[in-house]
Image: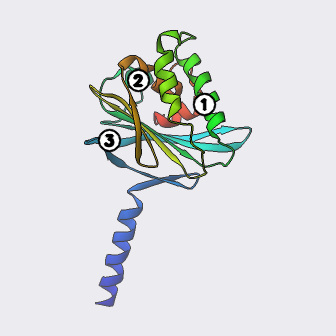
Amino acid sequence: MKKHFFTFIFLIISTLSFCQTTISGVKLDETITIEGKKLVLNGAGIREKWWIDLYVGSLYLPKKSTNGAEVVNSTEAAAIKLDVVSGMVSSEKMMGALDEGFVKSTNNNIAPLKEKIDKFKSFFKEKFNKGDSFTFVNVSGTGIVVYKNGVKKGTVEGQDFKKALFGIWLSNNPADKNLKKSMLGI
């Protein structure tokens, strides 16, 4: 009886360990449900600068894809999650990185999106802490819904904005080529 009990406990622990991926100390769920949509972890990786891990970026989709352009252009539900793993990530640095990312993902054509970008950046004005989590969810017909630590911060409408935002990580000119590959699972 005791042997069966320990076997049962081992099986439960083994099963639970397969439900999460851990990167740089961040446990990522294999599936998430946001805004009523079930999404699967497509891939995840580390954004680093000067050999310092800054955040874990993960991509959640309705079904897995290795095609960045397809994900950027899709109107389906999707989410990008950023988990801050360094105290060096600040609100100011994140907004500067977003500015650079939007310039790259739009081929320096940010003028049509300026108001939307400014609204998006307003969600990052609070102090950042190591362990903070940001989730950007594309909700068809609504736009990008932004969460910080599970709390809804606001929404930015428009497929044009979604393409520019997801393009920061998944376009032909991403912020970090290695992170793009990891998020696409390639």
Q: What residue sits 40% from the left and 16% below the top?
A: 160
Q: Position of residue 20 (x, y in %)?
A: 42, 55
Kindly report which numbered mark, 3 or 2, lies closer to the viewer in this rendering: 2
Q: Position of residue 114 (x, y in %)?
A: 51, 16
Amino acid type, residue under disc 3 in the picture:
Leu
Which of the two discs, 3 and 1, labels the residue nearer the N terminus?
3
CA–CA distance in space, label 3 to label 1: 27 Å
Indicate the secondary structure of the residue bearing disc 1: helix
Quadrant where the image shows the N terminus: bottom left
Residue beneath disc 1 = 95
Q: What residue sits 69% from the left and 44% below the top?
A: 88
Residue beneath disc 2 = 162
Indicate the secondary structure of the residue bearing disc 2: helix
Q: Position of residue 94 (x, y in %)?
A: 61, 34
Q: Residue 155's quadrant in the figure?
A: top left
Kindly report which numbered mark, 3 or 1, lies closer to the viewer in this rendering: 1
Which of the two discs, 3 and 2, labels the residue nearer the N terminus?
3
The answer to whether one can see residue 32 in this image is yes
Asked if 58 appears above or below 28 in the picture, the reply is above
Amino acid type, residue under disc 1 in the picture:
Met
Amino acid type, residue under disc 2 in the picture:
Lys
Asked if 121 appears above or below 20 in the picture, the reply is above
Q: What residue sits 65% from the left and 45% below the top?
A: 53
Indicate the secondary structure of the residue bearing disc 3: strand
Residue beneath disc 3 = 39
Which of the two discs, 1 and 2, labels the residue nearer the N terminus?
1
Colour treatment of the image: rainbow
Depth order, front residue of 182/55: 55
